[in-house]
Image: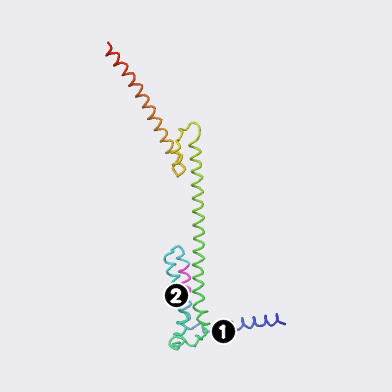
Amino acid sequence: MDMDNVDLNSVNEISGLWTYLKSIDWTDPWLIAVILSHICVTLTTILTRRYASFQALLFLALLLLVFFSEQINEIAARNWRSFSRQQYFDSQGMFISFIFSIPLLLDCIIMVCNWLWTSGTLMVQIKRAQLKRRIKEQKSLAGANEPGSPPCSKHSRERLSSGESSVNCRQRAASTNQETTSARSRQSTCSKNGCSKERKNSE
């Protein structure tokens, strides 16, 4: 019996809400204006999903409107004859919540979901970029230590691990080898010239 009572009560609540909605004169011009404004706000929310700054301002504006909905309801209840055909604004705020606050909160939920999706996508892109960079660094380290390539010093490997490419390391090693070879050739020529000068002086 209790379950039957619960079901009957729920059906009565649903039918009461439906009856309440049917009692509203949706052809009233100000209601049409409110509905069109909600459609415009929803379209603006969707179309500006890539503009975070604008959506932040819109989010705050919508929350402020929802926050002051009780005051708006009181003002509308006192002055309903100037713009409405019937008195819809009850003391409990059911009408203002249904026609005004709930659509604005749904727009806010859309923006929050969009921000969460954007943040998750950005985090995935950052992780992928980090993994690609690590793979490139590992390949660069492996290429720098291949046989036949100029060896890099310990200091160069430390630079390579911090993000320097293996091409720079090889160029540095090649320039070091060239400087060493040129220094040796200079030493050999200087030694030969020194020997010739000493022979001339002895003669």
Q: Is residue 202 left or right of residue 82?
A: left
Quarter of the image for residue 195 reads: top left
Q: Quadrant of the C terminus?
A: top left
Q: Secondary structure beneath disc 1?
A: helix
**Looking at the picture, which amino acid does disc 2 mark?**
Leu
Residue positioned 36% across, 27% down in the render: 183
The dot on residue 64 is 2
Residue drawn at (48%, 74%) of the image = 38
Residue at the extreme top: 203
Give the residue at x 51% y 79%. Answer: 97
Residue in front for this viewpoint, 160 or 127? 160
Name the chief secondary structure element in magenta: helix
In this view, the residue in front, 135 or 22, is 135
Question: Do labels 2 and 1 touch, CB within 8 Å?
Answer: no
> Looking at the image, is 143 positioned above or below residue 129?
above
Q: Which residues are magenta?
A: 38-45
The three-letter code of the residue at mark 1 reads Tyr
Which label belongs to residue 20?
A: 1
Compared across the picture, whether 192 is left or right of 108 comes to left
